[in-house]
Image: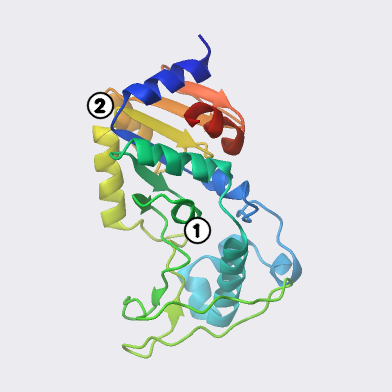
């Protein structure tokens, strides 16, 4: 029996399914990743120079402009077959929990509603000073392709600058999201790691937690790095998941 067939049988038998998705899933929708070469104004910058609290303190307009450009790219993108297949799986398996390292909303737009965002969300900014979120949603960004600096909006509560609602380099992951993810992994019967190598901590701890608790671990990625006993299917998420889930 092929790994795909074995995984399909395990998927049918399990109720407590946890899925961890990474940048590879969003990349298949055309969302730029941190590894993609930057263009226009952003060509002058290393992403690590823009994705930090220190960078925002030095030049908030440049950092906000970059994230508004990224948010525009996300809003222009559409959920791909991987997002839609996972949404179908969630309909059949109501206990399924989806954990993502991505900061876009493509899983939600595909129909998934139990989504834990480990690295925050581009759609949920907060105040750099008081950490509260604005009462109204941000306007749809309309940025030039070459990029530009944009002054961040002001907080409605304290007048401070709004910052992107994502986890920057040097920051800790949201404790509530991380605790929920660890609990889900501990209780999982099957954990699927999709579109990510799964080796960067603390997200890399999730397969280890599930493995110790006796769960089956399935990796789906173009390049596989498997622990002993794990299953792996080499390929793009948008090609493999529709075959696996139907």
Q: Quadrant location of residue 151?
A: bottom right
Q: Residue under circle 1?
A: 104
**Badges 1 and 2: C-beta atoms under 8 Å apart?**
no
Tell me if 125 is positioned left or right of 132 in this view.
right
Q: Give the colour scheme shown.
A: rainbow
Q: CA distance from mark 1 to mark 2?
A: 30 Å
Which tag is nearer the camera, tag 1 or tag 2?
Answer: 1
194 in relation to 179, above or below: above
Q: Residue under circle 2?
A: 213
Q: Position of residue 60 (x, y in %)?
A: 53, 80
The foreground one among 33 and 94 is 94
Where disc 1 sits, the SS reads loop
Tell me if 93 is positioned left or right of 82 in this view.
left
In percent of the image, x 31 and y 80: which residue is there? 130
Where disc 2 sits, the SS reads loop
Farthest residue, direction top = 1
Q: Position of residue 135 (x, y in %)?
A: 34, 81
Q: Is residue 131 visible?
A: yes
In percent of the image, x 28 and y 22: which residue is there? 214
């Amino acid at each position: 029996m092929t790994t795909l067939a074995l995984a399909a049988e395990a998927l049918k038998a399990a109720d407590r399914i946890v899925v961890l998705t990474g940048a590879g899933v969003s990349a298949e929708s055309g969302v730029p990743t941190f590894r993609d070469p930057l263009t226009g104004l952003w060509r002058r910058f290393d992403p690590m120079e823009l994705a930090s609290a220190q960078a925002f303190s030095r030049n908030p307009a440049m950092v906000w402009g970059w994230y508004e450009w990224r948010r525009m790219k996300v809003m222009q993108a559409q959920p791909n077959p991987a997002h839609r297949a996972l949404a179908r799986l969630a309909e059949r398996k109501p206990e399924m929990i989806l954990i993502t390292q991505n900061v876009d909303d493509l899983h939600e737009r595909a129909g998934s509603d139990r989504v834990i965002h480990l690295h925050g969300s581009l759609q949920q900014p907060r105040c750099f000073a008081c950490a509260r979120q604005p009462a109204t949603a941000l306007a749809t960004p309309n940025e030039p392709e070459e990029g530009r600096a944009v002054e961040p909006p002001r907080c409605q509560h304290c007048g401070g600058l709004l910052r992107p609602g994502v986890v920057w380099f040097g920051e800790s992951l949201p404790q509530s999201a991380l605790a929920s993810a660890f609990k889900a992994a501990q209780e999982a019967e099957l954990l699927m790691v999709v579109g990510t190598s799964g080796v960067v901590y603390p997200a890399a701890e999730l397969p280890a937690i599930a493995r110790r608790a006796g769960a089956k671990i399935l990796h789906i990625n173009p390049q596989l790095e498997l622990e002993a006993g794990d299953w792996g299917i080499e390929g793009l998420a948008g090609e493999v998941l529709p075959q696996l889930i139907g």
